[in-house]
Image (cartoon, rainbow, N blue to C red):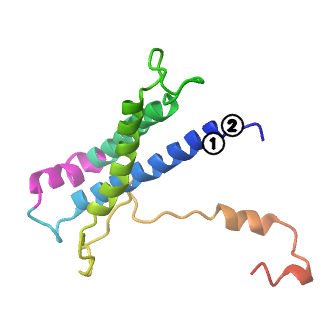
Amino acid sequence: MGMTMRDFCRMAQCCSVTADIISILMIWDAIFQDTHYYKNFMPRFKKLWSEDYGGWVRVVAFWFSLAFSCALTYYGILNAGVGDSYNDSRLGGMTESARVLLVSAIIFCDLFTVAQDWEFPSFQKDFNMSGDVLIGGTFVTTLHCDMLTRLLQKLPTIPEGCRRWFP
């Protein structure tokens, strides 16, 4: 395939940290939209986040935070171990300590995602939000992705012997 293991691992780390960052931002966005569950938690900020300026504060803040966080972590991941020497820190490479800090930051993202759960650490309460929660970075409550359905409709009919595998 022409890809080294080092490049594949970097790609996997970038995908992992992107998923972590999106999860964290989605949780923050839902918390700041809540006016029922924890109504006394940062009420002025919640008003600014959700209502002021037509809700654009939350949309712009979400996308800016996503772009900045991803750019920062990608830079760290892609510059870790530059060249053949993993201890080369002269031209963009990272020392062993810097690589440990980078990996620690990624692990922190994972743990922070769990710790933000409103039922942490017991996970026992039922959670019912008042009103609809908008999806982070958007003004909608649901996303529809019917591209695969439309693609399957354009394909030729499935042979009779294969229909049991394709509903």
Q: Residue 52 at x, y = what percent?
A: 19, 48
Number of marks drawn:
2
**Image coords of residue 113 (percent x, y):** 33, 58
Splitting the image into 4 quarters, where does residue 165 fall? bottom right
Measuring from the top left, give residue 21's x and y in whole percent.
39, 49
Q: Are marks 1 and 2 in contact (CB under 8 Å)?
A: yes
**Quadrant of residue 27 within the rendered picture:** bottom left
What's drawn in magenta, residue-wise?
Answer: 41-56
| Magenta stretch: helix, strand or loop mostly | helix
Q: Nearer the viewer, residue 88 or 76?
A: 88
| Quarter containing the C terminus | bottom right
The image quarter in which residue 39 lies = bottom left
For residue 136, side relative to residue 116 (left or right):
right
The percent coordinates of residue 22 (x first, y second) are: 41, 51
Confirm whether the magenta stretch covers residue 53: yes
Q: At 42% across and 34% down in the image, what residue appears?
A: 99
- Find disc 2 in the rendering and name its residue: 4
Horizontal arrangement in the rendering, residue 81 relative to residue 37 (left or right): right
Q: Nearer the viewer, residue 121 or 146?
A: 121
Residue 137 appears in the figure: no
In the rendered image, which residue does mark 1 sit on? 8
